[in-house]
Image (tube, rainbow, N blue to C red):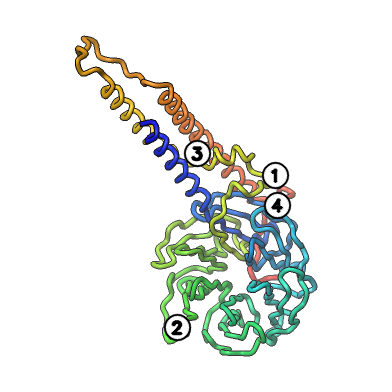
């Protein structure tokens, strides 16, 4: 009996640990505050409003081998940071690039799209060593009409062009820049973001409702004929400005109201219409890091959010689900305790005239009961603490470092 109860408790706690450690993290670039904020991609809980600071206009985000690459439209730099801690690896891995926008990383090659001015056809794609920042090709692709999205698929590079509002997606050789198909997708309208997930390119059409939408195009050579005339996955949107995809989850940021909405990527079903709320016009790029635990991230001051011991406790007891499971375990323990009481009773012993009072036959059961009660109590405490932290962090996230309210800005303004 002791071994069975220990197994039940161990499996339950292991399940809680696995559930928390697999949380996806959503990184969001904020134009207004010049920072990168980190959220729980499932719940929208603000984990750290100032994960990375000191930027001017962060735009493109890319993650590769545990490193987060950020293009800063305002400083002409691409910085490299530890994606788990926010620690600076090199704040100016690439510098001297005019208006850097989209970034992508593949096989230690950093691709950077930029615009050498505000006129049409001045856009370029350059490549750099993702470790040292050394220039590999200062002019991989040129004469582009406002490139705003990059995606690498093996030896192919897809470039999203904003154009004059009626852009396109081109296909190029990722190593040489040779044009493979300049009109791979010949028509996209006011597109702001592009993400490659699996064998699909996700693109937002950032126009006003009812023409704003999110489209999905295949890059599988055997199914390219499906792309022309493909219907939108999510139609009738009002100025979507950035997207991110992780598995079956699709995240869409909106320029007008500053929200990030969560959708089912397969069906287009709206799962949360206000997963994240920011000031209008503030969101730049977004990206998802899968399978990391929020407890490993530093807080706004750069300190670990909790000590190692408290991380374990919070991981086990930091949501209402844990309270429910703890209660279930407590009920299971009570039933087993009653079973042991009546199993151990001598059958020849006369039934007492007064009802037998409930008690545990060994100190082990009493100790286990105390442990489960502590789990429930601590679960309630940490759940309340996380609610207070989330409310406080969201309030602070609406202010600049000087305490003044932030001012929204256009995704494609300088």
Residue topped by disc 3: 317
**Which marked residue is nearer to the observer: mark 4 or mark 2?**
2
Residues tagged 3 and 4 counted as in contact (Cβ below 8 A): no
Residue 77 rendering spot, x and y as whole percentages:
76, 68
Residue 47 rendering spot, x and y as whole percentages:
59, 49
Residues tagged 2 and 1 counted as in contact (Cβ below 8 A): no
Report the number of discs: 4
Residue 227 — which label?
2
Residue topped by disc 1: 303
Say whether residue 245 is left or right of residue 346.
right
- Badge 3 marks a residue whose secondary structure is helix
If you read the primary sequence from the N terminus, does the residue marked by circle 3 or circle 4 appear first?
3
Q: CA distance from mark 2 to mark 3?
A: 47 Å
Give whichever of 115, 383 is nearer the camera.
383
Q: Residues within 10 Å of mark 2 (few under 14, many from 20)?
A: some
**Which marked residue is nearer to the observer: mark 3 or mark 4?**
3
């Amino acid at each position: 009996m002791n071994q069975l109860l220990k197994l039940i408790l161990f499996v339950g706690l292991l399940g809680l640990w696995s559930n928390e450690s697999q949380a996806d993290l959503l990184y969001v670039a904020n134009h207004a505050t010049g920072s990168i904020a980190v959220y729980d991609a499932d719940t929208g809980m603000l984990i750290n409003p100032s994960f990375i600071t000191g930027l001017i206009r962060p735009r493109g985000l890319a993650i590769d081998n545990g490193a987060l690459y950020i293009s800063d439209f305002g400083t002409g730099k691409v910085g490299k940071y530890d994606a788990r801690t926010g620690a600076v690896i090199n704040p100016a891995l690439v510098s001297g690039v005019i208006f850097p926008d989209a970034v992508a990383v593949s096989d230690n090659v950093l691709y950077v799209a930029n615009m050498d001015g505000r006129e049409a056809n001045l856009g370029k794609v350059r490549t750099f060593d993702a470790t040292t920042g050394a220039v590999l090709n200062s002019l991989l692709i040129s004469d582009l009409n406002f490139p705003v999205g990059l995606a690498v698929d093996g030896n192919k590079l897809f470039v999203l062009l904003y154009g004059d509002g009626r852009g396109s997606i081109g296909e190029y050789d990722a190593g040489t820049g040779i044009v493979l198909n300049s009109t791979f997708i010949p028509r996209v309208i006011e597109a702001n973001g592009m993400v490659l997930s699996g064998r699909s390119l996700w693109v937002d059409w950032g126009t006003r409702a009812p023409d704003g939408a999110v489209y999905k195009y295949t890059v599988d050579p055997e199914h390219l004929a499906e792309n022309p005339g493909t219907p939108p996955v999510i139609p009738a949107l009002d100025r979507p400005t950035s997207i991110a995809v992780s598995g079956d989850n699709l995240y869409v940021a909106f320029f007008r109201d500053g929200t990030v909405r969560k959708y089912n990527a397969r069906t287009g079903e709206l799962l949360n219409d206000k997963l994240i709320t920011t000031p209008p016009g503030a969101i730049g790029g977004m990206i998802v890091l899968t399978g990391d635990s929020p407890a490993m991230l530093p807080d706004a001051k750069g300190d670990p959010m909790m000590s190692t011991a408290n991380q374990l406790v919070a991981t086990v007891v930091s949501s209402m689900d844990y309270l429910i499971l703890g209660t279930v375990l407590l009920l299971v323990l009570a039933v087993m305790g009653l079973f042991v009481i009546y199993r151990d009773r001598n059958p020849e012993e006369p039934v007492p005239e007064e009802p037998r009072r409930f008690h545990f036959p060994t100190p082990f059961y009493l100790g286990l009961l105390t442990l489960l009660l502590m789990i429930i109590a601590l679960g309630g405490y940490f759940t309340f603490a996380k609610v207070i932290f989330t409310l406080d962090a969201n309030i602070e996230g609406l202010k600049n470092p000087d305490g003044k309210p932030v001012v929204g800005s256009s995704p494609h303004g300088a």
